[in-house]
Amino acid sequence: MYATLAHSEANWSADSSLSSITTAASPAASKCTLLNRFQPDFVVQGNYVIGGIFPIHFSLKLADLNGTYRPPPINCNAHKFNPRVFRLAQTMRLAVEEINQNPVLLPNHTLGYRIFDSCAHPLTGNRAVLSMLNGVSEGNSSMCTNASSILAVIGASGSAQSIVVSRILQTFRIPMISYASSCACLSDREKYPTFFRVIPSDDYQVKAIAQLLVHFNWTWVGLLRGDHDYGRFAAKGLLRELQDTKVCVAYQEIIPLLYTRKMGLRIMKVMRSSTAKVVVVFLGDLLMTPFMRDYMTQNITGIQWVASEALVMSSVLSGKEYYPYMGGTIGFGIRKGHIPTLGDFLQSVNPKRYPDNVLMPPCSGQESLLEQHSAYMNTSSLSVAYNVYKAVYAIAHSLHNLILCQPGRGPFQNNSCAQSNNIHPWQLQHYLQEVNFQIGDEEVDFDAKGDSVPYYDIINWQRGTEGNIEFVNVGLFNGTKAVGEELLIQEDRIMWAGHQMSVCSASCLPGSRKAVRRGEPICCFDCVPCDSGKISNQTIDCATCPEDFWSNNDRTACISKKVEYLTFHSLGIALTVMSVVGASFTLAVCGVFFYHRHTAIVRVNNSELSFFILFALTLCFLCCLLFIGKPTYWSCMLRHTAFSITFSLCISCILGKTLVVLAAFTATRPGHNIMKWLGPKQQRTIISSCTLVQVVICAAWLIDSPPFPSRNTQYEHSKIILECSVGSSLAFWCVLGYIGLQACLCFVMAFLARKLPGNFNEAKFITFSMLIFCAVWLAFIPAYISSPGNYADAVESFAILASSFGLLFCLFAPKSYIILLKPEKNTKQHLMGKEKK
């Protein structure tokens, strides 16, 4: 069965060097022969045999597949020997020997192995696994034996190779444990049901790299990956993890499996022109090495490399010639372990002991292994080798548990356990899924996807004592910790490539915000100042200050808004002076009138009403003082009601005087006796009644919705304007409307009496005073509506003062002039126009 599969794989790969068979047309002449040999180079027989696949050589001698002749076998390049991977194969051999000598683990049973070289290529890995399945030919015989009894396979190294190998093995339900294949794609149990690994999945690695980029605030990075599944899935996973962060990928370049200098120079041109100084690499050293050779010829420096686990422990790139270009590299490596007996075991392996083994390094056998292949003998920081060690022990423990299964209690068909002399790979797979054991200080088990617990060492490339690169552990990623707590970094131990920041745009200074450039990633932005009322302190957006606060000039802090109202230190001074002066003039006029109360001009013009008007005007002047100062509940109620009632009283008195003047001259006509209806009592009644209407309106206003102090933050956002809200707008305009109605009525009646005879016709002065009064208050309305806060109070105060001064001067200035400067005209005859000529 395995031979038939090998034949189909040979057709698929166009490689005639694969192990396969040919069958003669006649059944009698049937003969099984090997078309080509691909034998393992390390073989040990045992009760249970496991396979191993390692890329001991990292280059192939590719055949010319032109289809015109039978191609020669594809062989590994003997001069491209990888001592580090050769150490992995020896670690597998050591683990098997330890288990076979262990009296507790698999007692009375031994493990055997067959180790193949994959040459770091999926095609050769394919050949290796098919050779495992076909069994081993006996001696020099051209006949192949029965199907192989391989129970499990340890390998392969790269994810691309493991995908090929796992797809073949799953057909025969043979479990496979990888020591270095981290592609997240291999966690798909539907596609790879028999795949296990002791290395964490790249799903965890990309999370760790994303956290590292965020931790160091590297928001503008380049991405370099290989053209294989490992690179594709890792890059896709990293982009997914970076979606909700501030990190952007400036470019994503792919290094093909068949590298060319032309393609490498194109990638380097992109790297040189980009402002991204941090480059994330999802590559193995086999692809990175030729690229770095060209990279060094271009003398590109200052790049901070972030390496994945496939590269971060590469001994191939640890030479001192690489340090100027890759020194400071940081990345995540497989967690290190310790194998006490590995050093001595490695020294026991030499070409003399295995003279015909092509896996041995090319040397005479006289060289010192430590000098010739220092990477091979370096057991100070075992990571991948430790994974191989754990993989072998995982198979041994699973096999041990399988053999100890008691009949009638096992999980297999017919309710029976496996027989020790007839164990199948699929039986071992069940126990691999459930295995759990302790090795050193580490617990080994597999989750439902065949993945192991994610642990990474954070590795930094630093200059060693001899100028070469040393891998220094500067932290840990522990996947068992809570989200956000997995990363532990000792930053003081890190050596950087240049301490440069890797950003598309520098962080905005306090007081500004980010404005994303159209068509560019969110990491590329311009900095624009925050709007008024907003601040920023290294944040993406500007934050709005609370309602009672405003931004300072630099837009870096919120400060308390300036509180404004009509104070005695601004317009209030002028208003106060005008108010006091107006009240003083009014009192002075009142004093003059009182002193000359017996003269004709005072008596003729109804002295009682004149004193009422002067009293009301004094109150009008003084009520302006209520508009100055910080608004309070009582001042807001008083300022509007006081001026409305005093003005209503004043206009009522003027209305009464107008009626008296009009009635006095009308009474001189025959048949008219109207004066008896306008005596002093009637006049007081008229004034009281007219004023009482305004008092009722104000009382209803105060009871229903009185004025109250308010904080206006809408007109000028940087200030809080303290003002008095009128409460009920209807009541406010009713108050003003009633005063206007009184003024209009007074004006009409005075206008009718303007041509009455006499040298001193008071109706003319009342007419002028009402014209001024109405003009002032008509101009007041639009000015008041369009002015906020203290300005509205000032407008209202100026309207009160202007109308009060207008009434005072129009009504009393002519009389005061005659009293003080023209006393000879202060006679009844002169006032009535009857003096002798």
Image: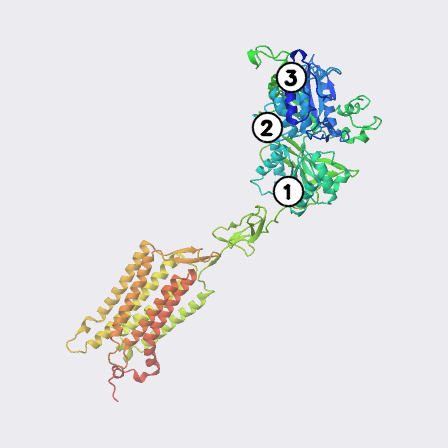
Q: Earlier in the sequence, mark 2 or mark 3?
A: 2
Read off the residue under disc 2.
187
Q: Earlier in the sequence, mark 1 or mark 2?
A: 2
The amino acid at mark 1 is: Gly
Secondary-structure class at tag 3 = helix
Q: Position of residue 469 (x, y in %)?
A: 75, 37
Disc 1 to disc 2, C-alpha distance: 27 Å
Disc 2 to disc 3, C-alpha distance: 23 Å
Camera-side residue of 364 and 218: 364
Q: Is residue 443 visible?
A: no
Camera-side residue of 606 and 12: 12
User: Measured along the vertical axis of the image, is residue 484 above or below residue 358?
Assistant: below
Read off the residue under disc 1.
222
Q: Position of residue 353 (x, y in %)?
A: 81, 21
The amino acid at mark 2 is: Ser
Q: Nearer the viewer, mark 3 or mark 1?
A: 1
